[in-house]
Amino acid sequence: MRTQVGIVGAGPAGLVLGHMLHLQGIESVVLESRSREFCQERVRAGLLEQNTADLFTEMGVGARMKREGLVHHGINLRFRGRTHRIDFAELTGRSITIYAQGEVIKDLIDARQAAGGPIFFEVENVSVCDFAASRPRILCQYNGQQTELTCDFIAGCDGFHGICRPSIPASALSVYQRDYPFGWLGILAHAPPSSEELIYAYHQRGFALLSMRTPEISRLYIQCTPDEDLRLWPDDKIWEELQVRLSSQEGWKLVEGPVLQKNVAKMHSFVTEPMQYGKLFLAGDAAHIVPPTGAKGLNLAVADVRILARAITEFYRSGRKDLLDKYSETCLDRVWKVQRFSWWMTSMLHRFDDDNAFDQRRQLAELEYLTSSRAASQSLAENYVGLPMD
């Protein structure tokens, strides 16, 4: 096979890139090791910055998102039993949209297939080679047959555990990483959300978050150990802990319901530099990971491929290579700002193993300042709804 851009990974980064290239008349092939069902059904982030939601609309894949997505104009911070709202609309004139990543994937796959764009699921033994030369290749097995895809560029959109980043010589990369001493125990519950907007709760027993997927489905999290044993957390115990950590002095009540799914996620911060080597370009989780507190993973992946699509388009349109050469530099400017915000939100709201009374009082003082200062609230709001794309 021969194409212009070979895309490894059918997550948000790979599918958005493929569709953006299609809109510019540029051919691509998407290769994914998992099944279509797995890609669409795995539980992932469900919060879109306004930049991301606007881009989906511009790309022609936002119709269902606009019908079914929940537009939020703020979030709530809860501590000492009181709730403080950060008003995005008043502070920034912008909003966020709650729309599950699985639904985003469905929309993008449907759009790709409607456009006749090649996409192959359950591809095995994928490897990338010759990306430092003029004709990069992707080797794989599909339906038991050995296949070679020759292309001009390779986009490594295959996630943190994918094959693209490890294919770059280790000596060419610098890795920056922080592992957090806690994780999130998350549940998906058949219960109407107990709040119209997200609630981030700081509590002596640990962080908690109330989120949602639809008007009937709630998504909730509690801080736990990174290796927490789910067998020790029956549904009743999870709801009891959520009731404590999300408690309020304002008469608010948490609505409970059947737990549909539960999982434990470890928390990391990770960046690799540069995000390109020869004609191999890394995007999304293949290049960086953020803790979920700031809800930036999917949005940062989309920002990466927006920059990459523009650079590739300009190359085919005019022969210019400068945007491709600057891809990593351009992306990393945003990546580190998002890392800072995600680290700050995480550090402010979670209990750490080595916390003492001083640390707890400092966190509360920061929350008090954040919710009483317009300047501080505006800074949070600007970062949460999404920094400018350009």
Image (cartoon, rainbow, N blue to C red):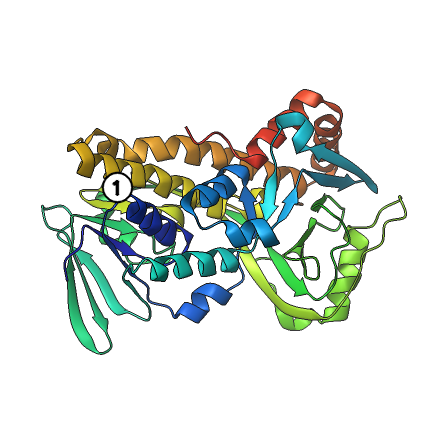
Q: Position of residue 306 (x, y in %)?
A: 36, 40
On the rendered image, what quadrant is the C terminus found in? Answer: top left
Q: Position of residue 67 (x, y in %)?
A: 59, 52
Q: Secondary structure at mark 1?
A: strand
* 54 left or right, relative to 152: right
* 97 left or right, relative to 318: right
- Is residue 53 visible to us here? yes
* 306 left or right, relative to 206: left
Q: Which residue is disc 1 drawn over?
A: 276
- Residue farthest left in this picture: 134
- Residue farthest bottom in this picture: 144
Residue 64, compared with residue 142, is above or below; it is above
**Label 1 sits on what residue type?**
Gln
Q: Nearer the viewer, residue 332 or 40?
A: 40
* 196 left or right, relative to 27: right
> Residue 20 is drawn in which quadrant?
top left
On the rendered image, what quadrant is the N terminus found in? Answer: bottom left
Q: How many marks?
A: 1
Residue 1, compared with residue 281, is above or below; it is below
Q: Nearer the viewer, residue 208 or 387?
A: 387
Residue 79, compared with residue 195, is above or below; it is above
> Residue 140 is drawn in which quadrant?
bottom left
* Residue for point 22% across, 51% down: 27
- Is residue 286 visible to us here? no
